[in-house]
Image (cartoon, rainbow, N blue to C red):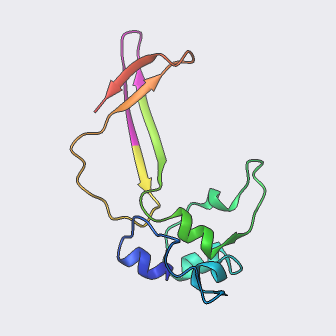
């Protein structure tokens, strides 16, 4: 199912469908008990962030197929790298993003990056 979601670039999944029928658990419910690993995701050529398998203290955690299907439809943007040059008057920077989500890229007319200082005041903006 995860491969189909990736191939068809799903952006959402409703739990209103195929959750329970006649009192029995079906796909979505059974996926909660089936663990997914980085090795499985790589085997099926599915996108994921390595940090998704870590908690806030950087400890390894287990994940289920249900969590993957819950978390990865749509976009899952992460900063790949940032470069900048600054002097006393200006700052020029570039941010490269990676989409780990299942949604296909679409044409975005305009995006703007806003750089904030420690006081959360806008220091610079860049389209």
Q: Is residue 87 above or below residue 14?
A: above
Q: Position of residue 39 (x, y in %)?
A: 63, 77
Which secondary structure dominates the residues rendered in magenta?
strand
Front residue of this view, candidates 11 and 125:
11
Q: Which residues are magenta?
A: 85-95
- Residue drawn at (69%, 81%) of the image: 34
Q: Residue furthest front?
A: 22
- Residue drawn at (73%, 54%) of the image: 55
Q: Position of residue 10 (x, y in %)?
A: 39, 70
Check if residue 96 falls in the magenta segment.
Answer: no
Q: Quadrant of residue 19?
A: bottom right
Q: Is residue 2 above or below residue 107?
A: below
33 to the left or right of 50: right
Q: Position of residue 17 (x, y in %)?
A: 49, 77
25 to the left or right of 120: right
21 to the left or right of 90: right
Q: Position of residue 112 (x, y in %)?
A: 32, 34
Q: Is residue 46 above or below residue 74?
A: below
Front residue of this view, candidates 110 and 73:
73
Q: Residue furthest top?
A: 88
Front residue of this view, candidates 53 and 2:
2
């Amino acid at each position: 199912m995860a491969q189909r979601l990736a191939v068809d670039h799903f952006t959402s999944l409703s739990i209103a469908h195929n959750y329970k029928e006649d009192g029995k658990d079906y796909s979505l419910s059974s996926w909660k008990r089936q663990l997914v690993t980085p090795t499985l995701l790589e085997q099926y050529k599915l996108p994921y962030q390595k940090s998704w398998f870590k908690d806030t203290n950087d400890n390894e955690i287990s994940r289920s197929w249900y969590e993957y299907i819950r978390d990865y439809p749509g976009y899952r943007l992460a900063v790949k790298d940032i470069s900048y040059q600054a002097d006393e008057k200006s700052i020029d920077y570039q941010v490269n993003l990676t989409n780990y989500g299942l949604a296909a890229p679409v044409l975005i007319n305009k995006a703007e990056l806003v750089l904030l200082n420690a006081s959360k005041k806008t220091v610079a903006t860049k389209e």
